[in-house]
Amino acid sequence: MNSSSSMLKRILGYAKRYKFSLFLAFLGSILYVSATLYAPKLVGDSIDKFVDKTTFVIEDILWIVVELLGVVVLGALFGWLMHSLLNKITYSIVKDLRIDAFKKILKVPVSYLDSHLSGDILTRIISDTDQVSEGLLQGFSQALTGIITIIVTIVMMILIKWEIAVVVIVLTPLSLFVAAFISKKSFKTFKAQAQIKGQMGGFLNEMITNQKMVIAYHQQNENIMKFESLDQELYKVGIRAQFNSSLTNPSTRFVNAIVYAAVATIGAIIIIHYPNIGFGVGALTAFLTYASQYTKPFNEISGVATELSNSFASLRRVFELIDEKEVVDESALEAIDIPKGVVQFQDVSFRYIEDKPLIENLNIDIPAGSKVAIVGPTGCGKTTLINLLMRFYDIHRGKIIIDGENIKEKTKDSLRGQIGLVLQDTWLFKGTVFENIAYAKENATLEEVKAAAKRAYADDFIEKLPQGYDTIISDDEGVSLGQKQLLCIARLMLRSPQILILDEATSNIDTRTEVMVQKAFHHIMEGRTSFIIAHRLSTIRNADKILVMNQGTIVEQGTHQDLLAKNGFYKKLYESQFE
Protein backbone atom coordinates (compact mmCIF):
# COMPACT_ATOMS: atom_id res chain seq x y z
CA MET A 1 0.00 0.00 0.00
CA ASN A 2 1.08 3.57 -0.71
CA SER A 3 0.64 5.64 2.47
CA SER A 4 0.58 9.44 2.23
CA SER A 5 4.06 9.67 3.73
CA SER A 6 5.54 7.09 1.37
CA MET A 7 3.89 8.75 -1.64
CA LEU A 8 5.25 12.12 -0.54
CA LYS A 9 8.71 10.60 -0.20
CA ARG A 10 8.48 9.08 -3.66
CA ILE A 11 7.29 12.29 -5.30
CA LEU A 12 10.15 14.16 -3.65
CA GLY A 13 12.42 11.56 -5.22
CA TYR A 14 11.12 12.68 -8.62
CA ALA A 15 11.73 16.31 -7.58
CA LYS A 16 15.39 15.56 -6.82
CA ARG A 17 15.98 15.22 -10.55
CA TYR A 18 15.52 18.99 -10.75
CA LYS A 19 17.76 20.04 -7.85
CA PHE A 20 19.15 23.16 -9.52
CA SER A 21 15.70 24.49 -10.42
CA LEU A 22 14.52 23.70 -6.89
CA PHE A 23 17.47 25.64 -5.46
CA LEU A 24 16.67 28.66 -7.64
CA ALA A 25 12.99 28.45 -6.71
CA PHE A 26 13.94 28.27 -3.02
CA LEU A 27 16.24 31.27 -3.38
CA GLY A 28 13.54 33.17 -5.26
CA SER A 29 10.98 32.38 -2.56
CA ILE A 30 13.31 33.69 0.17
CA LEU A 31 13.81 36.98 -1.67
CA TYR A 32 10.11 37.20 -2.57
CA VAL A 33 8.92 36.63 1.00
CA SER A 34 11.60 38.90 2.46
CA ALA A 35 10.65 41.75 0.14
CA THR A 36 6.95 41.22 0.82
CA LEU A 37 7.42 41.19 4.61
CA TYR A 38 9.71 44.20 4.66
CA ALA A 39 6.90 46.40 3.27
CA PRO A 40 4.75 46.35 6.49
CA LYS A 41 7.74 47.60 8.49
CA LEU A 42 8.13 50.55 6.13
CA VAL A 43 4.41 51.32 6.36
CA GLY A 44 4.56 51.12 10.15
CA ASP A 45 7.57 53.46 10.26
CA SER A 46 5.79 56.02 8.07
CA ILE A 47 2.68 55.92 10.28
CA ASP A 48 4.76 56.51 13.41
CA LYS A 49 6.46 59.48 11.73
CA PHE A 50 3.08 60.98 10.82
CA VAL A 51 1.73 60.42 14.35
CA ASP A 52 4.78 61.93 16.07
CA LYS A 53 4.68 65.57 14.91
CA THR A 54 7.94 66.43 16.68
CA THR A 55 10.00 64.13 14.42
CA PHE A 56 8.02 64.57 11.21
CA VAL A 57 10.27 65.28 8.21
CA ILE A 58 8.84 65.11 4.68
CA GLU A 59 12.14 63.90 3.22
CA ASP A 60 12.00 60.84 5.49
CA ILE A 61 8.50 60.01 4.24
CA LEU A 62 9.57 60.36 0.61
CA TRP A 63 12.54 58.08 1.18
CA ILE A 64 10.23 55.47 2.77
CA VAL A 65 7.93 55.72 -0.28
CA VAL A 66 10.92 55.11 -2.60
CA GLU A 67 12.00 52.11 -0.51
CA LEU A 68 8.43 50.79 -0.54
CA LEU A 69 8.20 51.03 -4.34
CA GLY A 70 11.55 49.26 -4.69
CA VAL A 71 10.45 46.49 -2.35
CA VAL A 72 7.19 45.99 -4.27
CA VAL A 73 8.98 45.76 -7.65
CA LEU A 74 11.59 43.34 -6.32
CA GLY A 75 8.90 41.23 -4.63
CA ALA A 76 6.95 40.97 -7.90
CA LEU A 77 10.10 40.03 -9.83
CA PHE A 78 11.21 37.32 -7.41
CA GLY A 79 7.63 36.05 -7.10
CA TRP A 80 7.43 35.63 -10.88
CA LEU A 81 10.77 33.79 -10.88
CA MET A 82 9.67 31.44 -8.10
CA HIS A 83 6.28 30.57 -9.66
CA SER A 84 7.80 30.08 -13.12
CA LEU A 85 10.35 27.62 -11.75
CA LEU A 86 7.73 25.79 -9.69
CA ASN A 87 5.54 25.42 -12.78
CA LYS A 88 8.46 23.94 -14.69
CA ILE A 89 9.37 21.55 -11.86
CA THR A 90 5.76 20.42 -11.31
CA TYR A 91 4.99 19.66 -14.93
CA SER A 92 8.38 17.99 -15.38
CA ILE A 93 7.56 15.66 -12.47
CA VAL A 94 4.14 14.87 -13.93
CA LYS A 95 5.76 14.29 -17.34
CA ASP A 96 8.13 11.78 -15.70
CA LEU A 97 5.18 10.10 -13.94
CA ARG A 98 3.32 9.70 -17.24
CA ILE A 99 6.40 8.29 -18.97
CA ASP A 100 6.97 5.79 -16.14
CA ALA A 101 3.31 4.76 -16.26
CA PHE A 102 3.43 4.31 -20.05
CA LYS A 103 6.66 2.31 -19.83
CA LYS A 104 5.00 0.10 -17.23
CA ILE A 105 2.15 -0.71 -19.63
CA LEU A 106 4.72 -2.05 -22.09
CA LYS A 107 6.40 -4.15 -19.38
CA VAL A 108 3.50 -5.65 -17.41
CA PRO A 109 2.37 -9.19 -18.20
CA VAL A 110 -0.44 -9.55 -20.73
CA SER A 111 -2.56 -10.93 -17.87
CA TYR A 112 -2.62 -7.47 -16.25
CA LEU A 113 -3.98 -5.82 -19.40
CA ASP A 114 -6.49 -8.63 -19.86
CA SER A 115 -7.82 -8.20 -16.32
CA HIS A 116 -8.08 -4.37 -16.25
CA LEU A 117 -10.38 -2.09 -18.20
CA SER A 118 -8.43 -0.10 -20.76
CA GLY A 119 -10.45 2.99 -19.87
CA ASP A 120 -9.36 2.74 -16.23
CA ILE A 121 -5.69 2.51 -17.29
CA LEU A 122 -6.13 5.53 -19.56
CA THR A 123 -7.70 7.48 -16.69
CA ARG A 124 -4.72 6.75 -14.47
CA ILE A 125 -2.21 7.98 -17.05
CA ILE A 126 -4.11 11.08 -18.21
CA SER A 127 -6.73 12.30 -15.72
CA ASP A 128 -5.05 11.16 -12.51
CA THR A 129 -1.69 12.64 -13.43
CA ASP A 130 -3.43 15.93 -14.31
CA GLN A 131 -4.97 15.95 -10.84
CA VAL A 132 -1.54 15.27 -9.34
CA SER A 133 -0.07 18.28 -11.17
CA GLU A 134 -2.72 20.62 -9.74
CA GLY A 135 -2.05 19.47 -6.18
CA LEU A 136 1.73 19.47 -6.56
CA LEU A 137 1.81 22.99 -7.99
CA GLN A 138 -0.09 24.34 -5.00
CA GLY A 139 1.76 22.11 -2.56
CA PHE A 140 5.25 23.15 -3.70
CA SER A 141 4.28 26.81 -3.76
CA GLN A 142 2.76 26.74 -0.26
CA ALA A 143 5.61 24.67 1.15
CA LEU A 144 8.32 27.06 -0.04
CA THR A 145 6.63 30.39 0.68
CA GLY A 146 4.78 29.16 3.76
CA ILE A 147 7.78 27.94 5.73
CA ILE A 148 9.83 31.03 4.92
CA THR A 149 6.89 33.33 5.73
CA ILE A 150 6.39 31.68 9.13
CA ILE A 151 10.07 31.99 10.05
CA VAL A 152 10.47 35.61 8.91
CA THR A 153 7.22 36.82 10.50
CA ILE A 154 8.13 35.19 13.81
CA VAL A 155 11.43 37.06 13.79
CA MET A 156 9.77 40.36 12.88
CA MET A 157 7.04 39.99 15.53
CA ILE A 158 9.56 39.14 18.24
CA LEU A 159 11.59 42.21 17.31
CA ILE A 160 8.50 44.42 17.60
CA LYS A 161 6.89 42.92 20.75
CA TRP A 162 7.81 39.41 21.84
CA GLU A 163 5.00 39.13 24.43
CA ILE A 164 2.28 39.49 21.79
CA ALA A 165 4.29 37.31 19.38
CA VAL A 166 4.07 34.45 21.86
CA VAL A 167 0.26 34.67 21.82
CA VAL A 168 0.20 34.49 18.01
CA ILE A 169 2.75 31.66 17.82
CA VAL A 170 0.92 29.52 20.39
CA LEU A 171 -2.67 29.97 19.15
CA THR A 172 -2.32 29.98 15.34
CA PRO A 173 -1.10 26.34 14.87
CA LEU A 174 -4.43 25.17 16.35
CA SER A 175 -5.79 25.63 12.84
CA LEU A 176 -3.45 22.90 11.59
CA PHE A 177 -5.01 20.33 13.90
CA VAL A 178 -8.45 21.28 12.57
CA ALA A 179 -7.23 21.03 8.97
CA ALA A 180 -5.53 17.68 9.56
CA PHE A 181 -8.65 16.18 11.13
CA ILE A 182 -10.91 17.29 8.27
CA SER A 183 -8.48 16.45 5.43
CA LYS A 184 -8.07 12.90 6.77
CA LYS A 185 -11.79 12.36 6.36
CA SER A 186 -11.92 14.00 2.94
CA PHE A 187 -9.01 11.85 1.65
CA LYS A 188 -11.15 8.70 1.95
CA THR A 189 -13.94 10.22 -0.12
CA PHE A 190 -11.53 11.54 -2.74
CA LYS A 191 -10.02 8.04 -3.01
CA ALA A 192 -13.47 6.60 -3.66
CA GLN A 193 -14.11 9.38 -6.18
CA ALA A 194 -10.93 8.51 -8.12
CA GLN A 195 -11.92 4.83 -8.24
CA ILE A 196 -15.38 5.62 -9.61
CA LYS A 197 -13.83 7.91 -12.24
CA GLY A 198 -11.69 4.94 -13.33
CA GLN A 199 -14.79 2.73 -13.63
CA MET A 200 -16.58 5.43 -15.60
CA GLY A 201 -13.59 5.81 -17.93
CA GLY A 202 -13.56 2.06 -18.58
CA PHE A 203 -17.31 1.99 -19.25
CA LEU A 204 -17.10 4.97 -21.63
CA ASN A 205 -14.23 3.34 -23.53
CA GLU A 206 -16.28 0.15 -23.96
CA MET A 207 -19.31 2.07 -25.21
CA ILE A 208 -17.37 4.26 -27.65
CA THR A 209 -15.33 1.41 -29.17
CA ASN A 210 -18.39 -0.86 -29.45
CA GLN A 211 -21.00 1.73 -30.39
CA LYS A 212 -22.23 -0.19 -33.44
CA MET A 213 -22.95 -3.29 -31.37
CA VAL A 214 -24.75 -1.24 -28.73
CA ILE A 215 -27.00 0.30 -31.41
CA ALA A 216 -27.48 -3.03 -33.22
CA TYR A 217 -28.77 -4.70 -30.07
CA HIS A 218 -30.83 -1.68 -28.95
CA GLN A 219 -28.94 -1.36 -25.68
CA GLN A 220 -28.80 2.45 -25.70
CA ASN A 221 -31.32 2.92 -22.89
CA GLU A 222 -29.79 0.12 -20.82
CA ASN A 223 -26.34 1.67 -21.09
CA ILE A 224 -27.69 5.14 -20.40
CA MET A 225 -29.13 3.74 -17.17
CA LYS A 226 -25.79 2.14 -16.27
CA PHE A 227 -23.95 5.39 -16.95
CA GLU A 228 -26.49 7.39 -14.95
CA SER A 229 -26.00 4.95 -12.08
CA LEU A 230 -22.22 5.47 -12.16
CA ASP A 231 -22.68 9.20 -12.57
CA GLN A 232 -25.08 9.32 -9.60
CA GLU A 233 -22.59 7.38 -7.49
CA LEU A 234 -19.82 9.78 -8.53
CA TYR A 235 -22.12 12.70 -7.69
CA LYS A 236 -22.82 11.40 -4.19
CA VAL A 237 -19.15 10.69 -3.44
CA GLY A 238 -18.11 14.04 -4.96
CA ILE A 239 -20.62 15.94 -2.82
CA ARG A 240 -19.34 14.22 0.32
CA ALA A 241 -15.72 14.91 -0.64
CA GLN A 242 -16.35 18.57 -1.36
CA PHE A 243 -18.46 19.04 1.78
CA ASN A 244 -15.79 17.52 4.01
CA SER A 245 -13.01 19.50 2.41
CA SER A 246 -14.98 22.76 2.37
CA LEU A 247 -15.14 22.70 6.16
CA THR A 248 -11.37 23.14 6.40
CA ASN A 249 -10.93 26.72 5.25
CA PRO A 250 -13.70 28.41 7.29
CA SER A 251 -12.74 26.43 10.39
CA THR A 252 -9.10 27.52 10.25
CA ARG A 253 -10.05 31.09 9.37
CA PHE A 254 -12.26 31.20 12.46
CA VAL A 255 -9.26 30.24 14.63
CA ASN A 256 -7.08 32.83 12.93
CA ALA A 257 -9.73 35.56 13.28
CA ILE A 258 -9.71 34.97 17.03
CA VAL A 259 -5.90 35.33 17.04
CA TYR A 260 -6.13 38.57 15.04
CA ALA A 261 -8.75 40.02 17.42
CA ALA A 262 -6.61 39.06 20.43
CA VAL A 263 -3.55 40.82 18.97
CA ALA A 264 -5.53 43.98 18.16
CA THR A 265 -7.05 44.08 21.63
CA ILE A 266 -3.80 43.51 23.51
CA GLY A 267 -1.95 45.99 21.28
CA ALA A 268 -4.59 48.69 21.78
CA ILE A 269 -4.46 48.21 25.56
CA ILE A 270 -0.67 48.59 25.54
CA ILE A 271 -0.82 51.76 23.44
CA ILE A 272 -3.48 53.37 25.66
CA HIS A 273 -2.21 52.35 29.10
CA TYR A 274 1.56 52.11 28.47
CA PRO A 275 2.37 54.89 25.94
CA ASN A 276 6.01 55.17 26.99
CA ILE A 277 7.27 51.65 26.19
CA GLY A 278 7.89 52.33 22.48
CA PHE A 279 4.92 50.44 21.03
CA GLY A 280 2.92 52.90 18.95
CA VAL A 281 0.16 52.87 16.33
CA GLY A 282 2.60 52.21 13.50
CA ALA A 283 4.14 49.27 15.35
CA LEU A 284 0.66 47.85 16.03
CA THR A 285 -0.26 48.27 12.35
CA ALA A 286 2.90 46.42 11.29
CA PHE A 287 2.32 43.76 13.96
CA LEU A 288 -1.27 43.15 12.80
CA THR A 289 0.01 42.79 9.24
CA TYR A 290 2.64 40.30 10.38
CA ALA A 291 0.04 38.41 12.41
CA SER A 292 -2.08 38.13 9.24
CA GLN A 293 0.97 37.09 7.23
CA TYR A 294 1.86 34.50 9.88
CA THR A 295 -1.63 32.97 9.79
CA LYS A 296 -1.78 33.10 5.99
CA PRO A 297 0.37 29.97 5.40
CA PHE A 298 -1.82 28.03 7.82
CA ASN A 299 -4.94 29.22 5.99
CA GLU A 300 -3.43 28.39 2.61
CA ILE A 301 -2.32 24.97 3.80
CA SER A 302 -5.86 24.25 4.98
CA GLY A 303 -7.23 25.69 1.74
CA VAL A 304 -4.98 23.49 -0.39
CA ALA A 305 -5.74 20.42 1.75
CA THR A 306 -8.72 19.64 -0.50
CA GLU A 307 -6.58 19.69 -3.62
CA LEU A 308 -3.84 17.69 -1.94
CA SER A 309 -6.30 15.03 -0.72
CA ASN A 310 -7.67 14.69 -4.24
CA SER A 311 -4.16 14.63 -5.69
CA PHE A 312 -2.93 11.99 -3.25
CA ALA A 313 -5.91 9.79 -4.09
CA SER A 314 -5.01 10.11 -7.79
CA LEU A 315 -1.30 9.69 -7.07
CA ARG A 316 -2.04 6.43 -5.28
CA ARG A 317 -3.70 5.08 -8.44
CA VAL A 318 -0.75 6.17 -10.61
CA PHE A 319 1.76 4.52 -8.26
CA GLU A 320 -0.36 1.35 -8.15
CA LEU A 321 0.14 1.10 -11.92
CA ILE A 322 3.84 1.99 -11.75
CA ASP A 323 4.35 -0.60 -8.97
CA GLU A 324 2.74 -3.42 -10.93
CA LYS A 325 4.91 -6.49 -11.33
CA GLU A 326 6.89 -6.39 -14.57
CA VAL A 327 7.85 -9.19 -16.86
CA VAL A 328 11.10 -10.58 -15.42
CA ASP A 329 14.25 -9.12 -16.94
CA GLU A 330 15.72 -11.77 -19.22
CA SER A 331 19.04 -10.09 -19.91
CA ALA A 332 20.84 -13.07 -18.38
CA LEU A 333 19.17 -15.48 -20.82
CA GLU A 334 20.33 -16.35 -24.30
CA ALA A 335 18.41 -15.65 -27.49
CA ILE A 336 16.69 -18.59 -29.13
CA ASP A 337 17.48 -19.62 -32.69
CA ILE A 338 14.73 -21.29 -34.70
CA PRO A 339 16.23 -22.68 -37.92
CA LYS A 340 13.67 -25.51 -38.37
CA GLY A 341 10.51 -24.94 -36.32
CA VAL A 342 10.07 -28.26 -34.47
CA VAL A 343 7.53 -27.57 -31.69
CA GLN A 344 6.83 -29.81 -28.70
CA PHE A 345 4.44 -29.40 -25.77
CA GLN A 346 5.57 -31.74 -22.97
CA ASP A 347 3.15 -32.31 -20.06
CA VAL A 348 2.02 -28.69 -20.25
CA SER A 349 -0.46 -27.45 -17.62
CA PHE A 350 -1.94 -23.97 -17.44
CA ARG A 351 -4.78 -22.05 -15.82
CA TYR A 352 -5.82 -18.40 -15.97
CA ILE A 353 -7.50 -18.62 -12.56
CA GLU A 354 -5.69 -20.56 -9.84
CA ASP A 355 -8.56 -22.86 -8.87
CA LYS A 356 -9.87 -23.40 -12.42
CA PRO A 357 -7.62 -25.70 -14.52
CA LEU A 358 -7.81 -25.16 -18.26
CA ILE A 359 -4.99 -27.25 -19.78
CA GLU A 360 -3.66 -30.30 -17.96
CA ASN A 361 -0.73 -32.52 -19.03
CA LEU A 362 -0.91 -31.56 -22.71
CA ASN A 363 1.51 -33.29 -25.11
CA ILE A 364 1.94 -32.28 -28.76
CA ASP A 365 4.69 -33.02 -31.31
CA ILE A 366 4.81 -30.78 -34.39
CA PRO A 367 7.44 -31.63 -37.04
CA ALA A 368 9.30 -28.83 -38.81
CA GLY A 369 7.46 -27.28 -41.74
CA SER A 370 4.09 -28.72 -40.69
CA LYS A 371 0.81 -26.96 -41.34
CA VAL A 372 -1.14 -27.46 -38.12
CA ALA A 373 -4.76 -26.44 -37.64
CA ILE A 374 -6.29 -26.04 -34.18
CA VAL A 375 -10.07 -26.37 -33.98
CA GLY A 376 -12.68 -26.77 -31.30
CA PRO A 377 -15.62 -25.04 -29.65
CA THR A 378 -15.34 -21.58 -28.12
CA GLY A 379 -13.36 -21.55 -24.87
CA CYS A 380 -11.69 -24.90 -25.49
CA GLY A 381 -8.15 -23.42 -25.29
CA LYS A 382 -7.21 -22.79 -28.94
CA THR A 383 -6.02 -19.20 -28.43
CA THR A 384 -4.49 -20.19 -25.10
CA LEU A 385 -2.07 -22.51 -26.93
CA ILE A 386 -0.94 -19.55 -29.02
CA ASN A 387 -0.61 -17.35 -25.92
CA LEU A 388 1.63 -19.98 -24.35
CA LEU A 389 3.70 -20.48 -27.51
CA MET A 390 4.27 -16.69 -27.78
CA ARG A 391 4.86 -16.53 -24.00
CA PHE A 392 2.16 -13.94 -23.49
CA TYR A 393 1.46 -16.24 -20.55
CA ASP A 394 3.91 -18.68 -18.99
CA ILE A 395 2.93 -22.27 -18.33
CA HIS A 396 2.54 -23.53 -14.77
CA ARG A 397 4.08 -26.96 -15.36
CA GLY A 398 5.80 -28.80 -18.18
CA LYS A 399 7.89 -27.52 -21.10
CA ILE A 400 7.41 -25.98 -24.50
CA ILE A 401 10.38 -26.86 -26.68
CA ILE A 402 11.29 -25.39 -30.08
CA ASP A 403 14.16 -26.96 -32.00
CA GLY A 404 15.32 -28.67 -28.82
CA GLU A 405 15.36 -25.45 -26.72
CA ASN A 406 13.09 -24.80 -23.73
CA ILE A 407 11.52 -21.43 -24.60
CA LYS A 408 11.27 -20.46 -20.93
CA GLU A 409 15.06 -20.46 -20.77
CA LYS A 410 15.36 -18.09 -23.74
CA THR A 411 14.52 -14.41 -24.16
CA LYS A 412 10.97 -13.54 -25.14
CA ASP A 413 12.08 -10.93 -27.66
CA SER A 414 14.15 -13.43 -29.61
CA LEU A 415 11.27 -15.92 -29.53
CA ARG A 416 8.65 -13.46 -30.74
CA GLY A 417 11.03 -12.05 -33.33
CA GLN A 418 10.95 -15.40 -35.14
CA ILE A 419 7.19 -15.95 -34.93
CA GLY A 420 4.74 -14.17 -37.21
CA LEU A 421 1.27 -13.45 -35.82
CA VAL A 422 -1.94 -12.34 -37.51
CA LEU A 423 -5.00 -12.10 -35.28
CA GLN A 424 -8.69 -12.06 -36.04
CA ASP A 425 -8.86 -8.61 -34.43
CA THR A 426 -6.82 -6.37 -36.68
CA TRP A 427 -4.82 -3.40 -35.41
CA LEU A 428 -3.49 -0.37 -37.22
CA PHE A 429 -2.04 2.78 -35.67
CA LYS A 430 -2.43 6.34 -36.95
CA GLY A 431 0.29 6.73 -39.54
CA THR A 432 1.01 6.04 -43.20
CA VAL A 433 0.31 2.76 -44.92
CA PHE A 434 4.05 2.30 -45.29
CA GLU A 435 4.64 2.80 -41.55
CA ASN A 436 1.91 0.32 -40.63
CA ILE A 437 3.36 -2.43 -42.79
CA ALA A 438 6.98 -1.59 -41.90
CA TYR A 439 6.06 -1.95 -38.21
CA ALA A 440 7.10 -5.60 -38.47
CA LYS A 441 10.67 -4.93 -39.55
CA GLU A 442 13.11 -2.27 -38.42
CA ASN A 443 14.54 -0.11 -41.23
CA ALA A 444 12.33 -1.75 -43.86
CA THR A 445 12.68 -0.20 -47.32
CA LEU A 446 9.81 0.90 -49.55
CA GLU A 447 10.67 -1.86 -52.01
CA GLU A 448 10.41 -4.51 -49.25
CA VAL A 449 7.09 -3.11 -48.07
CA LYS A 450 5.68 -3.06 -51.60
CA ALA A 451 6.82 -6.64 -52.19
CA ALA A 452 5.10 -7.78 -48.97
CA ALA A 453 1.92 -5.90 -49.94
CA LYS A 454 1.89 -7.57 -53.34
CA ARG A 455 2.23 -11.03 -51.79
CA ALA A 456 -0.71 -10.18 -49.54
CA TYR A 457 -2.74 -8.88 -52.52
CA ALA A 458 -2.94 -5.49 -50.80
CA ASP A 459 -0.88 -3.54 -53.36
CA ASP A 460 -3.83 -3.00 -55.69
CA PHE A 461 -6.04 -1.10 -53.25
CA ILE A 462 -3.06 0.73 -51.68
CA GLU A 463 -2.10 2.25 -55.03
CA LYS A 464 -5.68 3.55 -55.38
CA LEU A 465 -5.50 5.44 -52.08
CA PRO A 466 -5.09 9.26 -52.32
CA GLN A 467 -1.36 9.23 -51.52
CA GLY A 468 -0.67 5.54 -52.03
CA TYR A 469 1.76 4.23 -49.43
CA ASP A 470 1.98 7.71 -47.90
CA THR A 471 -1.76 7.85 -47.12
CA ILE A 472 -2.51 8.47 -43.46
CA ILE A 473 -4.75 5.77 -41.98
CA SER A 474 -5.75 4.56 -38.52
CA ASP A 475 -7.59 1.68 -36.92
CA ASP A 476 -10.97 3.32 -37.49
CA GLU A 477 -10.57 5.43 -40.62
CA GLY A 478 -9.11 5.34 -44.10
CA VAL A 479 -9.53 1.63 -44.94
CA SER A 480 -12.24 -1.02 -44.71
CA LEU A 481 -12.22 -3.96 -42.33
CA GLY A 482 -11.07 -6.36 -45.04
CA GLN A 483 -8.33 -3.98 -46.17
CA LYS A 484 -7.11 -3.67 -42.59
CA GLN A 485 -6.74 -7.45 -42.49
CA LEU A 486 -4.79 -7.43 -45.74
CA LEU A 487 -2.41 -4.81 -44.34
CA CYS A 488 -1.85 -6.95 -41.24
CA ILE A 489 -1.11 -9.95 -43.44
CA ALA A 490 1.35 -7.84 -45.45
CA ARG A 491 3.00 -6.90 -42.17
CA LEU A 492 3.47 -10.61 -41.41
CA MET A 493 4.86 -11.33 -44.87
CA LEU A 494 7.42 -8.55 -44.46
CA ARG A 495 8.88 -10.34 -41.44
CA SER A 496 8.86 -13.78 -43.12
CA PRO A 497 9.38 -15.71 -39.84
CA GLN A 498 10.10 -19.40 -39.34
CA ILE A 499 6.88 -20.05 -37.40
CA LEU A 500 3.52 -18.60 -38.45
CA ILE A 501 0.38 -18.17 -36.34
CA LEU A 502 -2.86 -17.30 -38.08
CA ASP A 503 -5.80 -16.75 -35.73
CA GLU A 504 -8.79 -16.53 -38.10
CA ALA A 505 -6.53 -14.35 -40.24
CA THR A 506 -8.91 -14.28 -43.23
CA SER A 507 -12.16 -13.86 -41.30
CA ASN A 508 -12.80 -10.29 -42.52
CA ILE A 509 -11.93 -10.82 -46.17
CA ASP A 510 -14.44 -11.53 -48.92
CA THR A 511 -14.45 -14.98 -50.51
CA ARG A 512 -12.67 -13.92 -53.72
CA THR A 513 -9.88 -12.15 -51.84
CA GLU A 514 -9.61 -15.03 -49.40
CA VAL A 515 -8.80 -17.42 -52.24
CA MET A 516 -5.90 -15.18 -53.33
CA VAL A 517 -4.65 -14.73 -49.77
CA GLN A 518 -4.81 -18.47 -49.14
CA LYS A 519 -2.53 -18.90 -52.16
CA ALA A 520 -0.17 -16.33 -50.70
CA PHE A 521 -0.24 -18.14 -47.36
CA HIS A 522 0.48 -21.43 -49.11
CA HIS A 523 3.57 -19.84 -50.65
CA ILE A 524 4.87 -18.34 -47.41
CA MET A 525 4.10 -21.50 -45.42
CA GLU A 526 6.43 -23.62 -47.53
CA GLY A 527 9.26 -24.83 -45.30
CA ARG A 528 7.77 -23.08 -42.24
CA THR A 529 5.81 -24.42 -39.29
CA SER A 530 2.33 -22.91 -39.31
CA PHE A 531 -0.43 -22.86 -36.72
CA ILE A 532 -3.90 -21.98 -37.98
CA ILE A 533 -6.79 -21.37 -35.62
CA ALA A 534 -9.98 -21.77 -37.61
CA HIS A 535 -13.70 -21.80 -36.99
CA ARG A 536 -14.58 -22.45 -40.62
CA LEU A 537 -13.32 -26.01 -40.89
CA SER A 538 -13.59 -25.97 -44.67
CA THR A 539 -10.51 -23.69 -44.76
CA ILE A 540 -8.15 -26.17 -43.10
CA ARG A 541 -8.89 -29.40 -44.95
CA ASN A 542 -5.37 -29.41 -46.44
CA ALA A 543 -3.61 -29.13 -43.08
CA ASP A 544 -0.90 -31.71 -42.36
CA LYS A 545 -2.33 -32.17 -38.88
CA ILE A 546 -5.54 -31.03 -37.23
CA LEU A 547 -5.61 -30.76 -33.44
CA VAL A 548 -9.15 -31.03 -32.09
CA MET A 549 -9.48 -29.43 -28.66
CA ASN A 550 -12.22 -29.59 -26.08
CA GLN A 551 -12.00 -28.20 -22.52
CA GLY A 552 -8.24 -27.70 -22.70
CA THR A 553 -7.45 -31.19 -23.99
CA ILE A 554 -6.49 -32.60 -27.40
CA VAL A 555 -9.35 -35.06 -27.92
CA GLU A 556 -8.44 -35.97 -31.52
CA GLN A 557 -5.66 -35.32 -34.01
CA GLY A 558 -4.94 -36.30 -37.58
CA THR A 559 -5.67 -35.22 -41.14
CA HIS A 560 -9.08 -34.04 -42.27
CA GLN A 561 -9.91 -37.37 -43.92
CA ASP A 562 -8.62 -39.42 -40.97
CA LEU A 563 -10.73 -37.45 -38.49
CA LEU A 564 -13.87 -37.73 -40.61
CA ALA A 565 -13.30 -41.48 -40.84
CA LYS A 566 -13.13 -41.71 -37.02
CA ASN A 567 -16.73 -40.45 -36.89
CA GLY A 568 -15.93 -38.61 -33.64
CA PHE A 569 -15.93 -35.12 -32.20
CA TYR A 570 -14.33 -33.48 -35.25
CA LYS A 571 -16.92 -34.94 -37.63
CA LYS A 572 -19.71 -33.52 -35.47
CA LEU A 573 -18.06 -30.09 -35.54
CA TYR A 574 -17.53 -30.28 -39.29
CA GLU A 575 -21.05 -31.41 -40.14
CA SER A 576 -22.60 -28.88 -37.77
CA GLN A 577 -21.34 -26.08 -40.01
CA PHE A 578 -23.41 -27.34 -42.92
CA GLU A 579 -26.62 -28.09 -41.06
Image (spheres, helix red, strand yellow):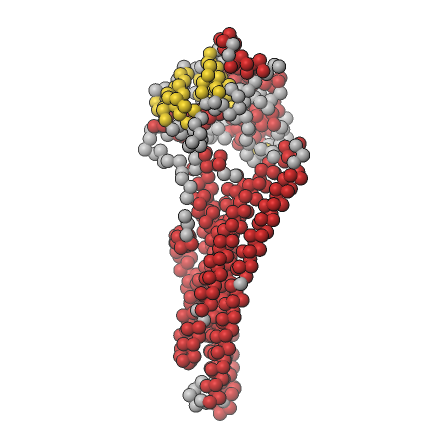
Q: Residue furthest front?
A: 355
Horizontal and vertical percent position of residue 483: 60, 26
In the image, residue 343 sits, relative to residue 12, either above or below, namely above
At 43% from the left and 37% from the top, the residue drawn is 108
Residue under the image location 42 percent in, 31 percent down = 355
Quarter of the image with the C terminus in it: top right
Q: Is residue 158 above or below residue 115?
A: below
Q: Is residue 194 visible?
A: yes
User: Where does residue 205 sit, x and y in percent of width and height?
Assistant: 57, 39
Residue 571 position (above or below residue 148)? above
Q: Quadrant of residue 361?
A: top left
500 is higher (above) or lower (below) than 313 = above
Note whether residue 501 is visible.
no
**Image check: 162 left or right of 242?**
left
- Which residue does the image show at 60% across and 49% down from the upper left? 232
Give the total of numbered labels. 0
Q: Residue 301 in the image: state x and y as whole percent.
A: 48, 63
Looking at the picture, tell me which residue is in the foreground, 126 or 302. 302
Toward the left, the furthest residue is: 332
Q: Nearer the viewer, residue 260 or 463?
A: 260
Q: Residue 507: percent from the left, percent from the top?
A: 58, 22
The residue nearer to you, when weighing 210 against 91, is 210
- Which residue lies at the image location 34% right of the left edge and 34% below the top edge? 331
